[in-house]
Amino acid sequence: MTDLYRLLPEEMESLVIELGQPRYRADQILYSLYYKFPENISEIKQLPAAFRDTLRDKGYTIGSTKEVHRITSKDRETTKLLLKLQDETPIESVLMQYPSKKLFGHPRSTICVSTQVGCAMGCVFCATGQMGFERNMKAEEIVGQVIHFAKILAEKDQHITNIVFMGMGEPLANYQETILAIRLLTHPRGFGIGQRNITISTIGIISGIEQLAEENLQIGLAISLHAPNDKLRKWLVPTAGANSVMELIKAGQRYFLKTGRRVTFEYALIEGVNDSIEIAEELAFLLRNNGSHVNLIPINPTAGDFERPKRKNVIEFERILYNSGINCTVRVEKGTEISAACGQLRTDVLDKYNNKRN
Ligand code: SAH
Ligand code: SF4
């Protein structure tokens, strides 16, 4: 079985020609996939029925993800989808909308996608990390998450403006499928979103960052640092190498030099763990003159005994970085009441969903 969402436009052309059809059939399929969002091959109405049968006979399908459940936050700005993969595995993806003046009344609509079921990196504060690793997602399963939201938004005459790879899993540990998904999503004859509107977040797999820099892509990179020294980082990210902090800073610099895209360092702030003034000063010293951006993420208490930091500590932490000339933002909380924060996907919604059904 091959999902049509897995094929790049050039491969779609080769396929239709191989099956004895004119080249323009590929465009008909692509138009349908990326503008009409069909749920199965029968819904590609532009194709002759006989050709649809041939595609099915040859083992082509559509729909490696099915919507099972949808939750929208009270302010309607966050929507979480519980999707089921073909092997019945449940996963989650989130849409976050922000009002925007630039987009002529349309909101900025960011989709947070997952790349793995579970995660092997074991970060102690992350619900996905505590779940363990189940399996990698296929490119069509990653694309499928985007397509479901594109369909929901199209019904409201809206569209996806940004995609962040910050859901479940470590994208660079599923490198090939993640890159294929990005190529499908950014291809002008595919989904066609701008490369600059995509950000990959990584826990910091150095070889993956190096490889990504060579892909000739203009995507943004966010590196999850979480600590200014190796001892603390190794505790929070047990799979990190012995010298991960400096290695990550250097890898970020090389990515910037190669791609011209500024790197963001993500820093999950945890009460009493990595949110003190001393640690903020250590981080500020580490990142001074680095030109990078820091995104502070007050954690959602989802795993272990970790607590969200006090508001005054977050402000103080931000001020210390800011005073050292470091560009810094605090992640806006969105959809907490529906547990839609990245890094806590699936677990809660499954519980709620199951409770509702029982
Ligand atoms: N594996 C990648 C991408 C997925 S995690 C990475 O770690 O970067 C995406 C983001 O969610 C990371 O920045 C991570 O720090 C954050 N995250 C994980 N657990 C969280 C929690 N409990 N609360 C808030 N953010 C969390
Ligand atoms: Fe995996 Fe990212 Fe969670 Fe760490 S924070 S366990 S790398 S998903």
Image (cartoon, rainbow, N blue to C red):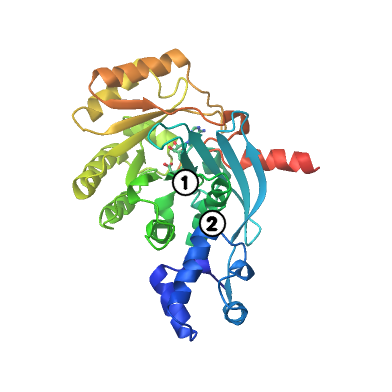
Q: Position of residue 102 (x, y in %)?
A: 37, 35
Which residue is label 1 attached to? 160
Give the amino acid at mark 2: Gly
Q: Is residue 298 visible?
A: yes
Query: Which residue corresponds to the image point at 28% horizontal and 20% vertical from the top-left?
Result: 322
Question: Label 1 CB, ligand 1: below 8 Å?
Answer: no
Residue at the bottom extreme, as displayed: 20
Judge the density around disc 1: few (<14), some (14-19), many (≥20) Cα neighbours within 10 Å: many
Residue toward you, 160 or 215? 160
Query: Which residue corresponds to the image point at 61% horizontal and 45% vertical from the top-left?
Result: 81
Residue at the top extreme, as displayed: 312
Q: Position of residue 94 (x, y in %)?
A: 54, 42
Query: Which residue corresponds to the image point at 46% horizontal and 84% vertical from the top-left?
Result: 18
Residue toward you, 29 or 255? 29
**Label 2 element class:** helix
Kindly indicate the quadrant of the structure image that contains residue 190. Answer: bottom left
Whether 20 is drawn above or below 231: the answer is below
Q: For this view, does 185 lie left or right of residue 63?
A: left
Q: Position of residue 251 (x, y in %)?
A: 25, 45
Which residue is label 2 attached to? 144
Kindly indicate the quadrant of the structure image that contains residue 228. Answer: top left
Q: Please name which of the two marks, 2 or 1, marks the residue nearer to the observer.
A: 1
Q: For this view, does 154 lie left or right of residue 12?
A: right
Give the amino acid at mark 1: Ile
Q: For this view, does 284 lie left or right of residue 1?
A: left
Please tell me which of labels 2 and 1 falls first in the chain.
Answer: 2
**Label 1 element class:** loop
Structural distance between the alpha carbons of marks 2 and 1: 13 Å
Whether 21 is drawn above or below 245: the answer is below
Query: Which residue corresponds to the image point at 56% horizontal and 59% vertical from the top-left?
Result: 37
Q: Position of residue 308 (x, y in %)?
A: 51, 23
